[in-house]
Image: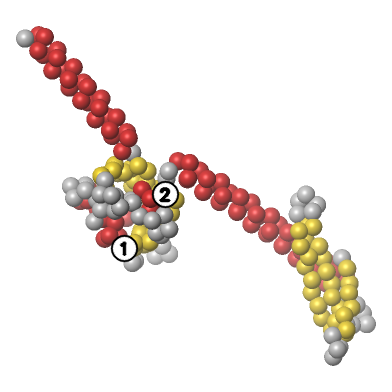
Amino acid sequence: HEDYHLDLGLENYAIAAEPIIDRQGKIVATLSVGRPSSPLGWQSSEQDLLKRAANTLGLALERSERLSQAETRVDLAIEATNLGLWSIDLGSDRVSWGGRHAELYGFPSNTREIPLGQQEALVWPEDLPLIQSRLSQAIQDFEPYEIEYRICRQDNNEWRWILARGQAIKGADGKAKQILGTIIDITARHKALEQIEASMQAERQTAAQLAA
């Protein structure tokens, strides 16, 4: 703890400063307060209060740094797994995107929000009623949402398979206010299954011909 006295022209000010120290003992900042000078100086109770405030700020800064590091790790994990993040605001019927969502749908990577109807327009027509039914059930029952469906990418009109998972979130009134979830492209898996099915079908046909 340090005390300083500054002459600001009109009156003298007393400045008290307390270092903000992290858990490694490193000074990361300084907390300073000032007031008009008093013959009594800074009281011990005031100095203790300043020290407690500096300690609290030190812990808050450390938590903020840890949170930032955690967010960075999450971002890297999302990038590595090609996950897309989405959130449907049930009040405005708009979809917010994060992670790789925009790229998976063929939009510029900086696209962060579109109307829900615009997203639904990219869904294979036969798959859309099931998506809407599952979403309605998730909103009503707060059960986990999971579905596989096809989309037409906005940039090149290529059809892709998507796996979506989500969960409705309650508002203060107990009703669903939004749905949060993830998507991932599973086209490769579907193509592999199609190839396996085609191979098995060919083997069955060959076996039938030999038996005849």
49 sits to left or right of 98: right
Q: Distance between the residues labelled 2 and 1?
A: 18 Å
Q: How is the image coloured?
A: secondary structure
Q: Which of 136 and 103 is in front in this view?
A: 103
Q: Mark 1 falls on what kind of element?
A: strand
Q: Above or below — where is 154 with respect to 83?
A: below
Q: Which residue lies most toward the top here?
A: 211
Query: Mark 1 sits on what residue?
Result: 115
58 sits to left or right of 69: right
Q: Which residue lies most toward the right here?
A: 39
Q: Can residue 51 be seen in this view?
A: no
Query: Mark 2 sits on what residue?
Result: 100
Q: Residue at x 71, y 57 (%)?
A: 59
Which residue type carries mark 1?
Pro
Which residue type carries mark 2?
Arg
Q: Where is residue 212 in the image (x, y as percent from the top left)?
A: 6, 9
> Could you tell me if the residues under marks 2 and 1 are in contact, i.e. CB atoms within 8 Å?
no
Q: Nearer the viewer, residue 138 or 2?
A: 2
